[in-house]
Amino acid sequence: MEKLLLRNVDKENSHTIDVYLSGGGYRAFKKALKEMTPDDVVEEVKISGLRGRGGAGFPTGMKWEFAAADVKEPKFFVCNADEGEPCTFKDRVIIEKDPHALIEGMLIGAYATGCRYGYIYIRGEYPIGRKILERAIAEAYERGFLGENILGTDFSFDLYVHSGAGAYICGEETALIESLEGKRGEPRIKPPFPVNAGYLWKPTVVNNVETLANVPLIIERGGKWYSQIGSPDCPGPKLFPVSGKVKRPGVYELPMGTPLEEIIFEHAGGIVKDRKLKAVFPGGASSSVLTSEEINVPMDFPSLAKAGTMLGSGAIMVLDETDCIVKATLRLTEFFRHESCGKCTPCREGTDWLVRILRRIEEGKGSEDDLDVILSISETMENSFCGLGMAAHNPAASTVRKFKDEYLLHVKLGRCPFRSV
């Protein structure tokens, strides 16, 4: 497959505007600004079928249409660069290696939706990425792509970078907005949705880094061309970060819908030391686990939902036969307990209970009844206030269901059977 999202990353000084311009950078923005109306841009993105790459998979063109229709001013365009989930590192590649692709995507989106100001909310643990983005924004101002009356038109757009403080919950768009306003990062009640009442309660578009990097491709080559890539219900290229027990971990750009088995065994080189594959978390730390018999599944939103899990960020976490399912699940659940904002009881208390029970089992002090308790807690956590709590139980609930024998082995032996491996 032709590199599209990663077309610039291997070039020397790929983060600079000169390299970006030499490869046709900002050509799509010029086309949108000079040859298309805002409605034309929104329609082209709708035709493309682009869905958000941050996890929820909401149609991007539809989100832009809602924001464009709101008459309140000013409007804000926000990039969610708070890539905080374990083993997810796809946005980092774009931020550090091709920041102008992100900026161009934001410019096109801001023009289409009538936004006057923009923010890139970047996770606090990406200090290098922040410096690169700030330098890229300065270059864009110098070349006339940002500021007042851009390229001699009446379109104006100012862009700023804002660092988070390391809170995973701020990856949820309304918690991000709360943090951007200087408040504690906690999710808001929805509706109203950010497209109508977001930053400062004004219309606000929030898109993920990878989502925005797709936009210049769509405007330059057309929505119809883009819609032919990948699966019909979920078109376009996708960045898949692969980690864990594979021979070639990294970020792979492939068509949406590429089978999980192909990604692991062809692109990532298979399992380290040719061991047996044991389990895969296909959509990041909050996705439900798949067994080695379930990996012949297309990596797109509808296919993984049908398989009982989710695409999420697209981060593929691979475990082999030497990995302890209970220990891996405990580590993931400890992360979610630490990152719970504490606003709602199901998430705040549920993640803590799950950690206590999983730790007891991993130490060989659990009982068979603990497994039913885990499933009961998980069911309660479905009533959490936001997506963090609704998904935080997935690793525990799914591994209990699919690897029950391994849990029972811990109970029977009175210890973790993998400690000596």
Image: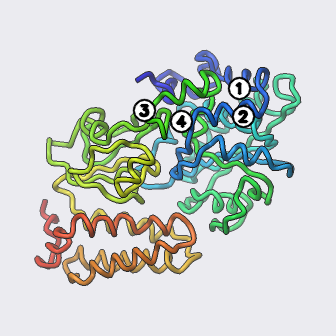
Residues at discs 1 and 2 in contact (Cβ within 8 Å):
yes
Residue at image mark 2: 107
| 184 is higher (above) or lower (below) than 20 | below
Residue at the spot 53% in from the left edge and 30% down from the top edge: 227
Tell me if mark 1 has few (under 14), some (14-19) or many (20+) residues whose alpha carbon lies within 10 angstroms of its own. Answer: many
Residue type, numbered disc 3: Pro
Residue type, numbered disc 4: Ile
Residue at image mark 3: 255
Disc 2 or 3, which lies upstream in sequence?
Answer: 2
The residues bearing labels 2 and 3 have C-alpha atoms spaced at a distance of 25 Å
Q: Quadrant of the C terminus?
A: bottom left
Please tell me whether mark 1 sits on a helix, a strand or a loop.
helix
Which of 21 and 290 lies nearest the eye of the viewer? 290
| 48 is higher (above) or lower (below) than 143 | below
Residue 29, numbered label: 1
Please tell me whether mark 3 sits on a helix, a strand or a loop.
strand
Q: Is residue 284 visible?
A: no
Residue type, numbered disc 2: Leu
Q: Position of residue 361 (x, y in %)?
A: 24, 77
334 horizontally vs 155: left or right = left
